Amino acid sequence: MIHVDPSMTDEEFLRLFEKGIHAQWGTDAIDWGLVETIPDAKKEALGHLITPVYLGEQTAMLGVSSVLPMILTGGHPEPALYLASMGLDEARHFRNLNHLYRVLGVEPLASRRLPEMWRYHARLLQKHDPVQWVFGILISDLFAKTFYGGFADRFPDSVVGRLSRRTLQDEARHQAFSDRYLNRMLPTMDPDAKHELLVLRDDLFRIMERLGERLRGSMEVLDWSPEEFLTELWDDTEKWVRRLGLVSATEV
């Protein structure tokens, strides 16, 4: 797993790592004011809807720590280098959402009320395979992108909108990492292994459909619906599935 002096020749991963280093930021980069513009009912709904993302940021930190050794063992130091910086991004998102709950004066849903999130993240690491995890993380990043994008649209002039827009920049960088890694690994995989990625996609969406029903009431407070959310996420995911060559345009 550990090499004293590994050859670092993949310039695309190295540039992405450097971009991530220069793009680091913290809680002091956000203006945490203008909370009073959000009605109490919407604050409570936000507290519920942020919960899946909040849990996702924490489990992403754990996922990075689990997958890093697998990627290093496979002899890929450059993507491992980027993943180390991605772990810091996830930790920052977790820290910021933790602070946002205090600023809003609301609490996340109790974990027992969102059992789908535990099933979701258990499914991501079920195969103990880095390619499966990165593909699952790509879907998770699109999941976060859809949530943060919805928050930014609905609360553009509040702390929620500002934090969401800044976080979306990190999510875009994570998608770029998944794109680079999967485009390098997919040509080495047989058809059955590629099909397993589509099975993972379908499993994750089934879990998210149940999650959407559980969050329906809170979403409706924000003039949102699980169907609208999942349609946007599915369309985004299928663009990536076609882009990665997992299916042709006629198969979707």
Image: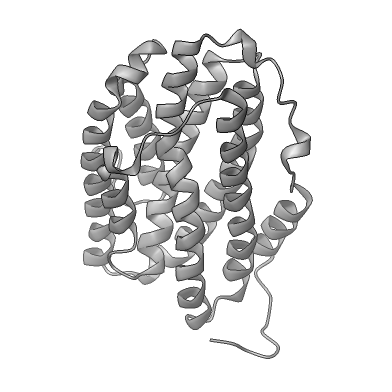
For the C terminus, give its image quadrant.
top left
197 vs 148, left or right, is left
**Which residue is drawn at the image coordinates 24% and 37% (left, top)?**
250
Count of numbered labels shown in the rendering: 0
The image shows residue 221 at horizontal and vertical percentages of 38, 12
| Residue 1 x/y as whole percent | 53, 86
Instruction: Please say if 27 is above or below 183.
Output: above
Q: Is residue 154 above or below residue 103?
A: above
| In-front residue for pair 37/53 | 37
Which residue sits at x=72%, y=39%? 27
The residue lying at 44 percent from left, 46 percent from top is 56
Q: Nearer the viewer, residue 38 or 168?
A: 38
Q: From the viewer's perspective, is 117 left or right of 210?
A: right
Task: Say if 113 sits above or below 48 in the image.
Answer: below
**x, y (%) of residue 210?**
21, 34
Asked whether residue 39 appears in the rendered view, the answer is: yes
| Picture layout, residue 235 above or below residue 112 | above
Q: Residue 34, image x and y in percent?
A: 69, 15
- Residue sitting at the far bottom: 4
Scheme of colours in the image: one colour
Does the rendering let one see residue 251? no
Report whether 30 appears left or right of 102.
Answer: right
At x 57%, y 37%, the residue is 97
